[in-house]
Amino acid sequence: MSSQFPEARPRRLRRTPQLRKLFQETEFSLNDLVLPIFVEEEIDDFVPITSMPGVRRIPESKLAGEIERYARAGIQSVMTFGVSHHLDGNGSDTWRENGLVSRMARICKDAVPEMIVMSDTCFCEYTDHGHCGVMHGAEVDNDLTLFNLGQQAVAAARAGADVIAPSAAMDGQVQAIRRALDAAGFHQTSIMAYSTKFASALYGPFREAGGSALKGDRKSYQMNPMNRREAVRESLLDEQEGADALMVKPAGAYLDIIRDIREASRLPLAAYQVSGEYAMIKFGAAAGAIDEERVVRESLGAIKRAGADLIFTYFAMDLALSGI
């Protein structure tokens, strides 16, 4: 056998840690990560979320201190989710000037003005039925919900939110919010659309985190996980309606969708590593089945490799504290 066989030897570039680092194709840093947080009103202390080890509901009274702690660790952006004690059929607390949505944005920006505050724009945590909009019989009324989403978006922007992130999965929501923001003078407020959001089984722990009152499911407005072409269509529609950035949710089981949308659009693309993805890694590590840190980095790397520019992940603080 010739000493020249084989001629192509990819292992040459893997020989040492230094070579592997030099030729690594995909990187991610804290600049790429957004930390989702849960803020509950009218409580005095943190509430652990049993299905999401290490994640807690933050008392509103301690939110400023938490935002300062995140900033010191290097976190540059948060997504706010409220746990409201003022529920009704419409989620009307969300568009009140001093409702929880507005207070969260105001507290975050007052505590750390340079923190990028993304306001999740939906109603599931503010309605007594747990759906993402106004109910008409057994269905969510799409167009009435659009009007209310516009009101919520304006309230959040007025309170200081940098980015409005509509997650209600209503047809036309990006256009409705863009028009409402512009009419109120918030031309510079960005929209991060949950543009391809699947009716996933991986949201289970989030329901505990957000105190969801949902009975039934959201399959009539969130996407069928088996649909690939429709996933691209949904994101392109949001782009046409004026979205500044797109999102795929969940992330890990939908890397093909992230890649498809990356190839179809030039907008910034986010992916949301959801509560179920987080919980599986945490519980798998607790059982000794996997190495948590390595799996976290591998999973986030896969999301970046598929084409995401930024990642929403509950691991953001863990990575910040580990010196990513």
Image: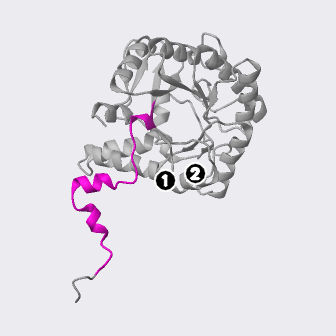
Q: Residue 22 appears at what percent x and percent y?
A: 31, 53
Q: Is 15 positioned to the left or the right of 313 in the image?
A: left
Disc 2 secondary structure class:
helix
Q: Residue 122 appears at what percent x and percent y?
A: 62, 29
Q: Nearer the viewer, residue 322 or 223?
A: 322
**Which residue matches tag 2?**
262
Q: Is 123 positioned to the left or the right of 273 in the image?
A: right
Q: Residue at x 29, y 52 (%)?
A: 21
Q: Which span is picked out in magenta?
A: 6-35
Residues tagged 1 and 2 counted as in contact (Cβ below 8 A): yes
Disc 1 secondary structure class:
helix
Q: Is residue 36 visible?
A: yes
How far is disc 1 from disc 2 in space, using C-alphas?
A: 8 Å
- Please, what is the three-letter code of the amino acid marked with disc 1? Ala
Q: Nearer the viewer, residue 317 or 116?
A: 116
First in sequence: mark 1 vs mark 2: 2
**Which residue matches tag 1?**
306
Q: Residue at x 40, y 46 (%)?
A: 300
Image vertical order of residue 160 relative to residue 123, above or below: above
Q: Is 237 positioned to the left or the right of 218 in the image?
A: right
Q: Nearer the viewer, residue 126 or 5?
A: 5
Q: Residue at x 38, y 39 (%)?
A: 29
